[in-house]
Image (cartoon, grey):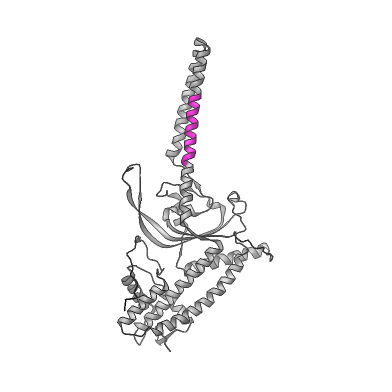
Amino acid sequence: MPDPTPTVAAPAAVPARRGRFIPLHKQDLLALLRRDANEAGLDFAPVEATLQIIEARLTSDFLARRDRLLADYALFDPDTDLVIVTGASAEERERRAAAIFAEVRQLLEQANFRGLDNVDIDRAIRAMSHWGVNIQVDLDAFAKLEVFARGERIDRRRRRTWQKMFYPQTVEVPLYQRLAVAFRMIPEELTEHGYRGDLIYLRLFKNIPEVDVDMVLPGTRVRMTVLDHGKIIFPTLSGLSITAWKIFKGALVVAAVGVYGLIAYLGIIIGTIGYGWRSFFGYLRTKEKYQLNLTQSLYYQILDSNAGAIVRLLHEAEQQELREAITAWYFLWRHASSTGWTIDELDQHVERFLQDRLRRDIDFDAHDAFAKLTAWNLIEEPTPNRFRARND
């Protein structure tokens, strides 16, 4: 019989920080657990029966959450094509908006995202992209802004620099495999970009470099470098200086040579002005190139938005809760002694297992899994503060 255990390929990027995300599909996780049980000669049926109980509990809970959250969000959804007939006062809208942010924050945490603080965001705003794009963001335009990330890794990418134009460099780029942004705008801010202060915007992105977090925020503007400004300033200033000098000399030349000298003199002035205009349009083309790079990058990196982002987060949170719960129950069933394990022992054994099988250093959230299993009456306490799986 072929081995059902999936083959885990070596990751293309190097983990940069321990995260709680378990990067396995449910069926692949079950295959790993089944193999571990087979090695001990144990029947896997109790695990599958417990999985059905856990799935039923989570499906019921998350379906109710989905219906409630999407109904509340309909009032703030920028993409809705429905007619909202149940109005709300300003105070009620603010209360609902706060509740939506709290619910989304909880979903992101259950999906094992972590919130980025102001230091992380400020560092991204101050840094230049690895691809030469510098972004300017007006944080004062936000009434509410929350950014979450998951899967912090070091990716390796190739790029050309002016030092090595014909020999691309391989550079290490710290990135977030998943990035989530939830925000509201201050009324009257960024309305020219289509944002409204009475709505709530949600965005999900993939593979965003840490220094490019500012690229996913609304109202970003390309900030030109000193070199880019110099492309127009220095030629223009030099052209004006030359023009002024020639005007001074031209007054003497015209007096000496008449009409033909005047025509030649005007040709010099027009040529100088034309050079200045060419420099100016070169500056605009450079700015448009940067803006195009920004747009193309985000086009391929956005995963979902608004109500679609909520549905996706609900699914990811449910799957993460399922993986944590069944893994914790399995280890308490398969490995815990008759006197049980402490929560710390459970945490250490699961992390060691995932490290060995996945070659990933995962920070397993044993306390959260323990809380769920306790609430569902799936574990017992044979001795004080020591637990094992209930299998009856």
> How many numbered callouts?
0
Whether residue 367 appears in this view of the structure is no
Span shown in magenta: 270-286
Residue 204 on image: x %, y %: 49, 60
* Left or right: 350 in relation to 263: left
As for residue 101 lying within the magenta part, the answer is no
- Percent across and percent down for residue 227 are 42, 38
Left/right of residue 175 with respect to residue 92 in the rendered view:
left
Going by the image, does 170 lie left or right of 373? left
Report the front residue among 68 and 343: 68
Closer to us: 171 or 379:
171
* Residue at the bottom extreme of this rendering: 392
Image point 53% across, 76% down: which residue? 61
Q: Position of residue 80 (x, y in %)?
A: 61, 61
Q: Residue furthest front?
A: 1
Is 36 rendered above or below residue 108? below
Point out the image quarter for the C terminus. bottom left
Identify the image quadrant of the N terminus.
bottom left
Q: In the figure, 214 relative to 255: above or below?
A: below
Q: Which residue appears at 33% of the width and 66% of the height?
A: 9
Q: Is residue 293 visible?
A: yes
Give above or below for 382 relative to 352.
Answer: below
User: Percent x, y for residue 225?
Assistant: 44, 42
Q: Main secondary structure of the magenta part?
A: helix
* Closer to us: 222 or 261: 261
